[in-house]
Every structure is written in structure tokens, then in C-alpha cells.
Amino acid sequence: MSGATVEPLTWKDYKSQVVPTWCPGCGDYGVLNAGYRSFANLGLDPDNTVVVSGIGCSSRFPYFVRAYGMHTAHGRALPVAMGVKLANPSLEVLVFGGDGDGFSIGGGHVPHICRKNADLTYVMMDNGIYGLTKGQISPTSQTGMVTKTTPYGGPDMPLNPLAFVLTYGATFVAQAFSSKPKVLEALISQAVKHKGFSFINVISPCPSFNNVNTFEYYKDKVDEIPSDHDSSDLAAALKLAIDSKNSGRVMQGIFYQTERPTLVENLKSIRAKAKGSKDFDVNKVIDLYKA
Ligand code: SF4
Ligand code: MG
């Protein structure tokens, strides 16, 4: 956690004047409310907090939070957030967005943010559909889902976001369900406190356009991660991510957490090395590029 903290603010103090425009019953309301409460618990200073998003229903998130916000281009929230963090590492930077935005058009950015261990908190609201454009299959849609653009059923295998980020080196990986606000609130707080890249996959149903993955569908599928799970064991975390996805279970909690130098720490140490070297001459680098 890097932003300055303030107190005492209540969760309502993090509400902006913009009223959410999501459909009634949208899972994203649960994520927003859990976010407010977690920001209040953490005592985040709105003047030192930046909420970044891409495009999609859930990417409206920054409008509803009293903090700095950036509603950027489709799939580009992570690199923009990384730029914000690099420009001012003392800011607390959070990214909120959906499955299509994050793992389809934005999917090429995710591995690099993970392996660089950029100190960001990324909350991905996974509804298995493109909601803003009124219901097309997304990278996490179940195989065979029928939509207006896939009348014979989408043939593709759904992507596993947890296994994806674990494979590429995310240092905090968790999962929650949008209508279990206490668990989600605690996980957001832990993710923000974590030093390095934190990812939370939040299953957040879209009652308007995904008639497969409904609240009713998940009713008996949400479970806690087994108490004997070792969250420092990457192989165990990957196995849990794959097994639970294959069995259709939504395991809530921390799959994996580890520590390694963050992007900002690595850059600081490179800067220190470069400044300390008598041989370093920026003009030589410029000449190399000109050659
Ligand atoms: Fe939520 Fe779906 Fe409505 Fe978008 S279309 S606001 S995801 S319920
Ligand atoms: Mg979606």
C-alpha cells in the first residue's frame, strides 16, 4: 500500500455525486459497495488514490468513486495505470474492469504487468459476456453459449483468468463473488495492502445478457478455499485454479501470495546503478540509436 491515508472517512465519503447507471440487479453494485467499504477501512486518501478503467459496463467504476479517475481506451487500463504509478509511485492505483476489456482486447497487457510486478490492484468483474454491447460471448463465456452473434453456440474454450495470472507471475491472486460483500471487501483490502501486482477475479453476474451464469446458477457453487490450502505454493494454487474452473466451483479467497521486488523498486535500483557508473553517458545511448 503506498498512498497516504486519512481518517476518519466513512464508506459513504467515497461515493461520488454520479449515480451508477448499471441495470437493476447487476453484480457490479456489490463490487462497488465492497470497494467503498474497503477504501474506508484502509483509510485511503481520495486525493492520493487513482481509479483507472478501460471500456465496458464495469469500467464505469471510476465515475462512482470520489477519488481521481481515468476512464481510458478499451483494454488499455493496465498500461495507463502502470504509467500513473511510474509517474508518481506514492499514489494508490487501482484498476477496475470486465472480462472482455481485460482478457480479450487487453489480454496482451496482462502478462507483462504480472511479470513486472507493477504495484497495482486489479479487480476484474467477470460476467462471462460483453454487457455494454448487449450480449456477445467474451473470453470467459462458457463453451456453447448462445448469443445474437453465436446463434449455434460459441465454440471456444473459456479462458481461466486465475491460471493465466498465476502463470505469468502475479504476486497476489484471489477470487470472490459479487454477492458475498464481506469476503470481497476483505480481499480488496488485502490486495491493496499487498506490495506488488494484486489480481482479484470477481464473479459478477450480468442478469440482462448472460442467462447461463446467473445468481441462481452460482447459488450452490460458491465455496471457501479449503483451509489447508497453502497460498505460498504456486503449484497448489495453479491446481486449485484449474480444478475449480473445470468443476464449475467458485472458490473464494487467496489462491496465491508471494513477495518479489516491484516494478518501481526494480527501476529505482537500475537508476541507482546507472547513476553510480562512471561509464554511463546518456549521449552514448543516443548515438547508439542514431547509428
Ligand atoms: Fe450489468 Fe449486464 Fe446491465 Fe451491464 S448489461 S450494467 S453488466 S446487468
Ligand atoms: Mg464482461
Image (cartoon, grey):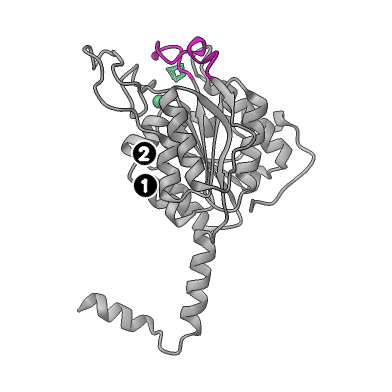
User: Which label sits in the foreground, 2 or 1?
Assistant: 1
Regarding residue 74, the answer to whether it shows in the image is no
Does 220 lie within the magenta span?
Answer: yes
Q: Quadrant of residue 128?
A: top left
**Residue shown at 62% from the left, 30% from the top:** 184
Q: How far apart are marks 2 and 1 (CA)?
A: 8 Å
Which portion, as a residue range, is magenta? 205-221
- Whole-percent x, y for residue 50 in the image: 56, 44
Within the magenta stretch, is there residue 240?
A: no
Which residue carries the number 1 mark? 109
147 to 64, vertically: above or below: above
**Quick check: can you spot residue 11?**
yes
The residue that disc 2 covers is: 75
* Residue 230 vertical placement versus 214 (above, below): below
Pick out the residue farthest to the front. 228
The C terminus - image quarter: bottom left
Q: Is residue 222 left or right of residue 75?
A: right
Pointers 2 and 1 in contact (C-beta within 8 Å): yes
Amino acid on which the number 2 mark rests in the picture: Gly
The quarter of the image that holds ligand 1 is top left
